[in-house]
Image (tube, grey):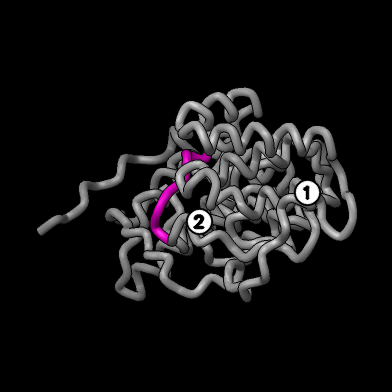
Amino acid sequence: MTHPRTSPATPGADTAADPLTDHAADPLTDHATGTGPRPAADPSDPAPGTTSPGTTTLAAAPTELRDHVTAGLDDPARGWLRRALDEAAAHPGTHGPISVWELRIAEAGRRCGPEHADAARVLILHAARADAEALSRVYYQGTGAERRAVLYALPHLVPGPEGLPLVEDALRTNDTRLLTAAVGPYAARHLDAHQWRHAVLKCLFTGVPVDAVADLDHRAEGDTELARMLTDYAAERTAAGRTVPADLHRVLTLTDPPATPSAPAADHG
């Protein structure tokens, strides 16, 4: 198998307006009663290009994730998260127009800060024992940050394929943070071969590092159809005078390691 010349890709900045987070500001809910409209999107949510804890951390078991998050929070945030988790555990499921724990998910960014907000939301979903129906409601009614939390929580909360429509919806976007969340362990477990190959291509197209793709080594091994798609994609970019993402060669190598020669060194001249 011959390989296209590769050069490092520069992930594109996520500068387009995110339709997932473009919500009108709603009046804030009375948190003492847990009633009223859903709070506005958190102004402290990470801006495009900023980061939350790594995807490996966010996909960790709830106990490990909680230990990681609480160690990084100050006392007021740690206390708020503890109360939010106790509240969610005591009142799981749906109560009224909107569950109290859903309100806590909406305010997590303000309470825990952008660095820990995703993890706090995932923990609240775990504490509430949200099922596929509840996760779908949070996903489709939520901001981009809340949608990410749902995707990270799927592997531990939905054992079957009922959450696949949420993954498929995320994979149709060009929001790199949402795509990163979508290609985690749940996608590795439940996406069929055709969908999974296109998810890998979407990562290459949008600049999402393939390190985010769960179980990549195992699923790519011996996948000749994925190899064909990658080679075609590389040829299209080369013909258009565009660089080939360095990650593409890495995935191509995984499809047939013994037959794959090393990539030539990139020409930096």
Q: Which residues are magenta?
A: 48-55
Q: Is residue 265 above or below residue 201?
A: above
Mark 2 sits on what residue?
45
* Disc 2 from disc 1: Cα separation: 20 Å
Q: Is residue 78 visible?
A: yes
Position of residue 109 measured from the top left corner of the image (x, y, whole percent): 54, 51
Residue at the far left in the pictured view: 269
Residue 225 among those drawn in magenta = no
Position of residue 20 measured from the top left corner of the image (x, y, whole percent): 61, 68
Q: Is residue 56 visible?
A: no
Position of residue 141 measured from the top left corner of the image (x, y, whole percent): 73, 64
Residue at the image point whose x is 58% and y is 56% from the top: 145
Q: Which mark is residue 100?
A: 1
Tell whether 140 sits left or right of 90: left
Name the amino acid type tagged 2: Asp
Quarter holding residue 235: bottom left
Q: Which mark is residue 140?
A: none
